[in-house]
Image (cartoon, grey):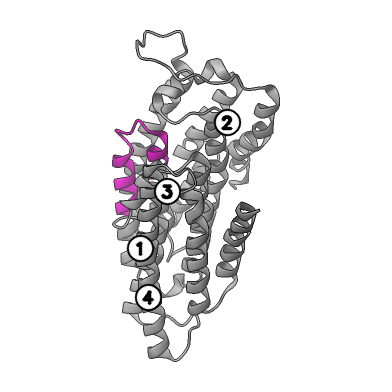
């Protein structure tokens, strides 16, 4: 009963934050949202989970302080808490830093890999997807008042650090965290020029990440070593996982390629071709570690020459696989047809 009430609070706080038009109400809803997810992070009572909950709370509290500071300063300058009245450069930049800290973009991204690693797979799914909806909606509302140079710099740094950070990872939750950082870079980089493209990118990422985490949870897969023996548990789930990873990496003609194509087209339209070229080159870093994971998943089937112990899994039933198969397949292939 208590878990259900906390989950309802998590959903309602996000909905109210996205529907609010006052910075004071948005700050209050984001605080409720933070307090609602902390029990999910620390539910396992493991020291690493408690550490993750502490890091998450401190980061979100700092971001909330900056958000309240920016909102109060803007209300003092303009006489209103209205989100659309962010004409002052200092307050709008401070608000941008606060919201990007909540989502986990460079340079305030260091908390995200550690928090995901200390959480369960389902909690990591919530942090990577649902928790980004409210801050992203607030950024969409104030996108007309954000400095373009600042968002372009944050976006490029996020795609670069997200790609480099995921290269050496053997823990899948950390790898997904760095993938989230890189994806947030793609989202922020075009926020001031074409906010709708940013929203398409973040929601496409959520659609692709949700079945990926659910498949990991169903197959008890947490490391790259676990991925090498996943085929013997469920070939169908393994194939779907590989397609989801490639789609998240942005490999054409899968779904994840669509928002990247839209963003590249917008950057070129804005005469930012050098920046678009560098951003495309940084996406190769993300593609490289996704290709490595896909190789381990589908092309390295047991029995193999590995001498280390492998993780025991209960064999997945067809019913469990068929629950996620339609969702995962649809989310992987549904959007390329929308390209004009």
Asked if the residue at tag 3 contacts the one at tag 2, i.e. Cβ–Cβ closer than 8 Å, the answer is: no
Q: Quadrant of residue 107?
A: bottom left
Disc on res. 151 = 1
Secondary structure at badge 3 equals helix
If you read the primary sequence from the N terminus, does the residue marked by circle 2 or circle 3 appear first? Answer: 3
For image coordinates 31% across by 78% down, the residue present is: 90
Pick the front one: 331 or 107: 107
If you read the primary sequence from the N terminus, does the residue marked by circle 4 or circle 2 appear first? Answer: 4
Residue 43 sits above or below residue 297 on the image: below
Nearest to the eye among marks 2 and 3: give it: 2
User: Which contiguous range is marked in magenta?
Assistant: 156-180
For image coordinates 29% across by 33% down, the residue present is: 168
Pick the front one: 141 or 122: 122
Residue 151, given in percent of the width and then of the height, sits at 35, 63
Disc on res. 218 = 2
Asked if the residue at tag 2 contacts the one at tag 4, i.e. Cβ–Cβ closer than 8 Å, the answer is: no
Instruction: Report which residue position mark 3 lands on.
Output: 183
Question: Is residue 270 something one can see in this rendering?
Answer: no
Q: CA distance from mark 4 to mark 2?
A: 42 Å
Residue 75 sits above or below residue 257 on the image: below
If you read the primary sequence from the N terminus, does the residue marked by circle 1 or circle 3 appear first? Answer: 1
The answer to whether residue 157 is magenta is yes
């Amino acid at each position: 009963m208590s878990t259900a009430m906390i989950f309802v609070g998590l959903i309602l706080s996000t909905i109210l934050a996205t529907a609010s038009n006052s910075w004071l109400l948005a700050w209050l809803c984001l605080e409720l949202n933070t307090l609602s997810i902390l029990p999910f992070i620390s539910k396992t009572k493991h020291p690493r989970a408690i550490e993750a909950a502490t890091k998450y709370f401190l980061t979100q509290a700092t971001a909330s302080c900056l958000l309240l500071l920016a909102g109060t300063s803007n209300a003092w300058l303009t006489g209103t808490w209205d989100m659309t009245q962010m004409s002052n450069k200092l307050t709008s930049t401070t608000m941008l830093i606060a919201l990007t800290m909540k989502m986990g973009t460079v340079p305030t991204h260091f908390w995200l890999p550690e928090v995901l690693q200390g959480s369960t797979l389902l909690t990591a799914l919530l942090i990577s997807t649902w928790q980004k909806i409210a801050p992203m909606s607030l950024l969409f509302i104030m996108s007309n008042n954000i400095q373009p140079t600042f968002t372009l710099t944050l976006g490029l740094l996020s795609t670069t650090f997200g790609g480099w950070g995921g290269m050496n990872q053997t823990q899948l939750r950390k790898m997904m965290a760095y993938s989230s950082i890189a994806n947030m870079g793609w989202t922020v980089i075009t926020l001031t020029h074409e906010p709708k493209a940013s929203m398409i990118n973040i929601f496409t990422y959520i659609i692709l990440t949700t079945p990926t985490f659910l498949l990991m949870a169903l197959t008890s897969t947490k490391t790259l070593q676990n991925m090498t023996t996943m085929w013997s548990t469920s070939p169908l789930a393994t194939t779907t996982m590989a397609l989801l990873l490639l789609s998240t990496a942005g490999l054409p003609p899968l779904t994840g390629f669509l928002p990247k194509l839209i963003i590249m087209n917008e950057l070129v339209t804005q005469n930012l071709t050098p920046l678009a070229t560098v951003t495309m080159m940084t996406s190769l870093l993300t593609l490289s570690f996704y290709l490595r994971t896909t190789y381990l998943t589908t092309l390295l089937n047991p029995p193999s020459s590995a001498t280390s112990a492998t993780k025991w899994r209960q064999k997945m039933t067809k019913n469990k696989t068929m629950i996620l198969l339609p969702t995962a397949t649809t989310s992987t292939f549904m959007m390329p047809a929308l390209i004009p």
